[in-house]
Image (cartoon, grey):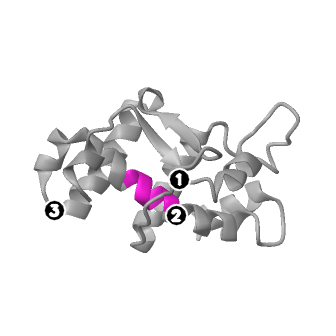
Amino acid sequence: MSEGEFTRTDRVYIDEGVIDVYRQLKKEANNEVEQAPFDTYKDLFMFAACMGFENGRRTKPRKGNNGGEVPSKVFTEDDLAILKAIAIAETGDVEVLNRFGEVLAIAEEYANAGIYEVKSSLLDERGRPLWNLVHLIGD
């Protein structure tokens, strides 16, 4: 990654190729929680980033007009602690904490890879996504 890619600190991107997965799993007024177990894109992004990290997979998202964004201001202190821990583990350098854009870029890449595992485990398996999530976490 070039230095210029780390300057963005106000948002993370969701690849246009996976935005439909986010839409399917995010709770809307007309969805049952069993079908859409995540309240926000941010919650799903965090889960996908952790899945990507756990599996050691990172892919850079394509930033297109049909993708989505999560403003960095919606991340809680707990969320940020997780994202920072992932960045430290990835780089092996605590100085990454001084480069918030890099922290977000690393998380973005893990989430972009991890969302495919989330899709496979929650949407492609038999059963309702919420219960598939419960089984995934419990295993």
Q: Image point 85% across, 40% down: which residue?
A: 31
Quadrant of the frame with the N terminus: bottom left
Q: Is residue 81 magenta?
A: no
Q: In the image, residue 37 lies at what x, y percent? A: 72, 47
Q: Which residue lies under the disc numbered 2?
A: 114
Q: Nearer the viewer, mark 2 or mark 1?
A: 2
Q: Is residue 29 above or below residue 90?
A: above
Is residue 138 something that shows in the picture? no
- Whether label 2 touches label 3, CB < 8 Å: no
The prevailing secondary structure element of the residues shown in magenta is helix
Residue at 41%, 39% in the rendered image: 79
N-term mark: 2 or 1: 1
Secondary structure, mark 2, is helix
Q: How many numbered badges does the structure rendering display?
A: 3
Image coordinates of residue 70 in percent, x first then y, are: 52, 37
Q: Is 35 positioned to the left or the right of 68 in the image?
A: right
Most extreme residue toward the right is: 30
Q: Going from the N terminus, do you reach mark 2 or mark 3 first? A: 3
Q: Identify which amino acid the numbered label 2 is placed on.
A: Gly
Which secondary structure lies at badge 3?
A: loop
Amino acid at the residue labelled 3: Gly
The residue at which mark 3 appears reads as: 92
Query: Is residue 28 rendered to the left or right of residue 8?
Result: right
Task: Of the two numbered discs 1 and 3 on the same chain, state the one appearing first in sequence.
Answer: 1
Residue nearest the viewer, comparing 36 with 136: 36
* Magenta stretch in the rendered image: 107-112
* Residue at the image position 20 percent from the left and 50 percent from the top: 3
- State the mark number for residue 8: none
* Distance from Cα at disc 2 to Cα at disc 1: 8 Å
Q: Are marks 2 and 1 in contact (CB under 8 Å)?
A: yes
Residue 45 percent across, percent down from the top left: 53, 48
Residue that badge 1 annotates: 47
